[in-house]
């Protein structure tokens, strides 16, 4: 009885501590918001007040007319190119990430040295932002589609290795143990336990990255001078806001469609 | 989608019906063997096993005991006593720090590669959480028990012979889950999943089956079915069953011998009905009160 009472008291303490933590976190966030405003001379109230005016400007300048629509085919062609680059770079990255994740997961690693090497490679490529990848690669590869592809590839690869490792650890720990205990070989364990258990979740991550990359591809294209990003940049610099808004709209619709499709696929496989 | 929702309710209905297993066993033969197995040959001896995971703290301390053919051996003890560790040392899923294990006349701790795999085919294992590949069918999961006998390519491409498939079906029917055979494992009840686990172990044609808390996630009814089945496997097929149990009464009811583990030491090794309150105190220590409250 004594023991359970103590446990109860402990629970209450834990809950109280959690509330305290939440309270302090709130205070700190508010302090940061205003502190940052003060340092950068940004006034939050004025910022909010200027939003309606900004929208008014947007509506006035960015509504496109019929003549702009004549360029639609060009927009769509480059949008399609961008989507393809995203899909190809994501799936290629996924294949490499699959191998590295199997090497990097504690559950399936062959030896610790390879495991840490795989994790390190993934961590490096993940922690360089996609924009930085694009800028670095532009220097060595110039402005072409390959640069965009590689920038997306590296960023995606790093992210997917990490997501895949977590998926493998989570989905297949128990079955890996069971199959090893039957005397199964390493390749058998991978093929019969890890892949069937982790595949649907991995596939879902790949779909997520394709969505993300179509957005990033626009940005990357802006930097590497390819795809829809290039077109955006071109018209933006010419102050042709009608074209800019047409392109933006096209990107938004494309992303929505891709999201819709990948949700459909996800529902089928999970 | 519509097909799936139709199947679900069906999946649960036969579960009830098949909970009563059809035992294709010879009851008289069982009676003869009922009283203990102290005369059966020793198939494995575990000698002076120590295990420390990291640092100095030993999880198993100088553990020594013999395992006889066809016996049901329960390992009981409080949480953290080292039961799961001991079980996995037996099939080398965990490497002991020191000691010796002899199985069928061979020293197992030095085995590597093919020899180690072949040793593992002689030892089946079932788990508290069943450890099935949920996304695959009952049939495929049972066939996984044969992987130890196959080379990598045969295993990966599921190249099982007709005879092997027939045996899988036989074992599945024996366990009363033939109606579920092509169902994905995540559509089964706990008791059914555990029977798939047993089938996967049986198809290995093992000498020993290790069971790590096989009934800890099951209701009393399903638990009874599983424990009775394990006992009958030992009687009918002369397979040794080593089972970690939380429930003292189940251990007393179903085993030929009980080993009590406390903090990595064997503190009891003997007949189930010779366990007195003194032995229970030694095994469960100060946790005795909790045990009675439960
Ligand atoms: N992988 C591991 N690494 C480090 N310590 C471990 C590991 N596995 C188990 N232990 C420790 O070894 C001790 C024995 O664990 P074990 O799982 O064998 O106990 P158990 O008797 O099976 O307990 P339970 O009844 O809770 O399953 C525990 O103190 C546990 O914390
Ligand atoms: Mg345990």
Image (cartoon, rainbow, N blue to C red):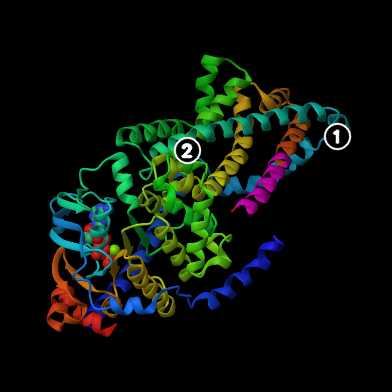
Relative to B202, A221 lies left or right: right
Question: Split into 4 quadrants, where in the image is the N terminus of chain B?
Answer: bottom right
User: Which residue occupies 57% across, 41% down?
Assistant: A206
Q: Nearer the viewer, residue B22 or A202?
A: B22
Is B259 part of what is drawn in magenta? Answer: no
Q: Which residues are magenta?
A: A253-269
Q: How many marks?
A: 2
Q: Give residue A61's position: percent from left, percent from top.
A: 77, 35
Q: Given contact means CB atoms under 8 Å apart, are the residues at marks 2 and 1 in contact? A: no
Q: Secondary structure at mark 1?
A: loop
Figure check: A197 above or below B250: above
Mark-to-mark CA distance, 2 and 1: 63 Å
Q: Nearer the viewer, residue A133 or A236?
A: A133
Residue at the disc numbered 1 = A65
Q: Residues within 10 Å of mark 1 (few under 14, many from 20)?
A: few
Q: Give residue A144's position: percent from left, percent from top.
A: 62, 18
Q: Nearer the viewer, residue A161 or A73?
A: A161
Relative to A44, A12 lies left or right: left
Note whether residue A57 is visible: no
Q: Residues within 10 Å of mark 2 (few under 14, many from 20)?
A: few
Q: Give residue A163's position: percent from left, percent from top.
A: 47, 43
Point out the frontmost of discs 2 and 1.
2
Q: Give residue B61's position: percent from left, percent from top.
A: 12, 59
Per the rendering, the mark at residue B153 is 2
Is A267 part of what is drawn in magenta? Answer: yes
């Amino acid at each position: 009885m004594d023991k359970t009472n103590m446990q109860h008291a402990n629970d209450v303490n834990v809950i109280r501590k959690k509330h305290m933590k939440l309270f302090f976190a709130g205070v700190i966030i508010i302090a940061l918001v205003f502190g940052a405003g003060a340092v950068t001379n940004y006034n939050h109230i004025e910022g909010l007040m200027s939003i309606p005016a900004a929208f008014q400007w947007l509506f006035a300048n960015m509504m496109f007319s019929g003549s702009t629509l004549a360029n639609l085919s060009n927009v769509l062609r480059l949008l399609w190119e961008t989507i393809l680059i995203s899909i190809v770079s994501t799936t290629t990255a996924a294949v490499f990430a699959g191998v590295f994740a199997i090497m990097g997961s504690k559950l399936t690693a062959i030896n610790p040295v390879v495991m840490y090497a795989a994790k390190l490679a993934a961590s490096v490529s993940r922690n360089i932002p996609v924009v930085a990848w694009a800028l670095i690669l532009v220097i060595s590869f110039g402005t072409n589609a390959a640069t965009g592809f590689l920038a997306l590839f590296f960023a995606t690869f790093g992210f997917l290795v990490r997501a895949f490792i977590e998926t493998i650890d989570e989905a297949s720990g128990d079955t890996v143990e069971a199959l090893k205990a039957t005397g199964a070989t390493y390749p058998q364990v991978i093929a019969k336990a890890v892949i069937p258990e982790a595949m649907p979740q991995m596939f879902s991550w790949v779909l997520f990255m394709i969505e993300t990359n179509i957005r990033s591809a626009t940005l990357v294209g802006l930097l590497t001078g390819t795809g829809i990003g290039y077109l955006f940049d071109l018209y933006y610099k010419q102050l042709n806001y009608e074209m800019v808004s047409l392109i933006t709209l096209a990107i938004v619709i494309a992303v929505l469609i891709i999201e819709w499709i990948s949700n459909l696929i996800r529902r089928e496989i999970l | 989608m519509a097909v799936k929702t139709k199947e679900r309710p069906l999946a649960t209905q036969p579960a009830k019906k098949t909970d009563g297993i059809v035992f294709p066993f010879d009851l008289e033969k069982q009676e003869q063997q009922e009283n203990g197995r102290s005369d059966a040959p020793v198939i494995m001896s575990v000698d002076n096993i120590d295990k420390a995971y990291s640092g100095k703290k030993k999880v198993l301390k100088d553990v020594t005991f013999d395992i006889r053919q066809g016996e049901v051996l329960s390992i009981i003890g409080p949480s953290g006593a080292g039961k799961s560790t001991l079980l996995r040392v037996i099939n080398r899923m965990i490497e002991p720090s020191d000691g010796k294990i002899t199985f069928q006349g061979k020293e197992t701790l030095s085995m590597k590669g093919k020899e180690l795999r072949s040793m593992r085919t002689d030892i089946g294992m079932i788990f508290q959480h069943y450890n099935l590949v949920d996304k695959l069918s009952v049939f495929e999961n049972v066939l996984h028990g044969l992987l130890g006998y196959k080379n990598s390519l045969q295993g990966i491409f599921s190249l099982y012979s007709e005879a092997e498939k027939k045996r899988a079906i036989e074992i599945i029917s024996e366990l009363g889950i033939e109606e579920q055979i092509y169902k994905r494992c995540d559509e089964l009840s706990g008791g059914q999943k555990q029977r798939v686990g047993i089938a996967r172990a049986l198809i290995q044609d093992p000498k020993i089956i290790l069971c790590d808390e096989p009934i800890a996630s099951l209701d009393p009814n399903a638990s009874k079915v599983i424990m009775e089945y394990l006992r009958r496997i030992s009687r009918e097929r002369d397979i040794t069953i080593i089972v970690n149990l939380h429930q003292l009464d189940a251990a007393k009811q179903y085993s030929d011998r009980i080993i009590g583990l406390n903090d990595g030491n064997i503190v009891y090794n003997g007949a189930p009905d010779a366990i007195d309150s003194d032995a229970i105190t030694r095994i469960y220590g100060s946790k005795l009160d909790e045990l009675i409250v439960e």
